[in-house]
Image (cartoon, rainbow, N blue to C red):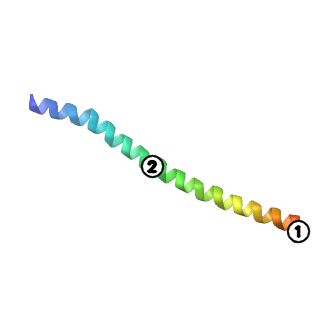
Amino acid sequence: QMIDQAWIEKLGPKMISLLNKIFAISTDNLQRGMIKIFLCLFLLTSTIALLALFNLF
């Protein structure tokens, strides 16, 4: 019966906790990459807008 409880514990709460941790890490990494892309695009667009505003483009 101890072995059955250990398996149930590994398949239940511990597995859910592990999956949640994996998904949280992958989502965090994805969002960090997206923030970098959005920041670079914002800076590029702002630079082009300023150049167009001052007729330097």
Of marks 2 and 1, the one in the foreground: 1
The amino acid on which the numbered mark 2 sits, given as a three-letter code, is: Ser
Residue for point 53% across, 55% down: 32
The amino acid on which the numbered mark 1 sits, given as a three-letter code, is: Phe
Q: Residues within 10 Å of mark 2 (few under 14, many from 20)?
A: few
Residue for point 18% across, 33% down: 7
Label whose residue precedes the other's in the sequence (2 or 1)? 2
Task: Read off the residue under disc 1.
Answer: 54
Q: Residue furthest right?
A: 55
- Quarter of the figure with the N terminus: top left
Describe residue 49's horizontal placement relative to residue 19 as left or right: right
1 is higher (above) or lower (below) than 39: above
Residue for point 48% across, 53% down: 29
Residue 25: percent from the left, percent from the top? 42, 50
Q: Residue furthest left?
A: 1
At mark 2, the secondary structure is helix
Residue 34: percent from the left, percent from the top? 58, 53
Q: Residues within 10 Å of mark 1 (few under 14, many from 20)?
A: few
Describe residue 7's horizontal placement relative to residue 56 as left or right: left
Q: Quadrant of residue 2?
A: top left
Describe residue 5's horizontal placement relative to residue 19 as left or right: left
Rendered image: mark on residue 26:
2
Residue for point 53% across, 51% down: 31
- Quarter of the figure with the C terminus: bottom right
Q: Quadrant of residue 45?
A: bottom right
At mark 1, the secondary structure is loop
- Cα separation, mark 2 vs mark 1, equals 43 Å
Q: Residue furthest top?
A: 1
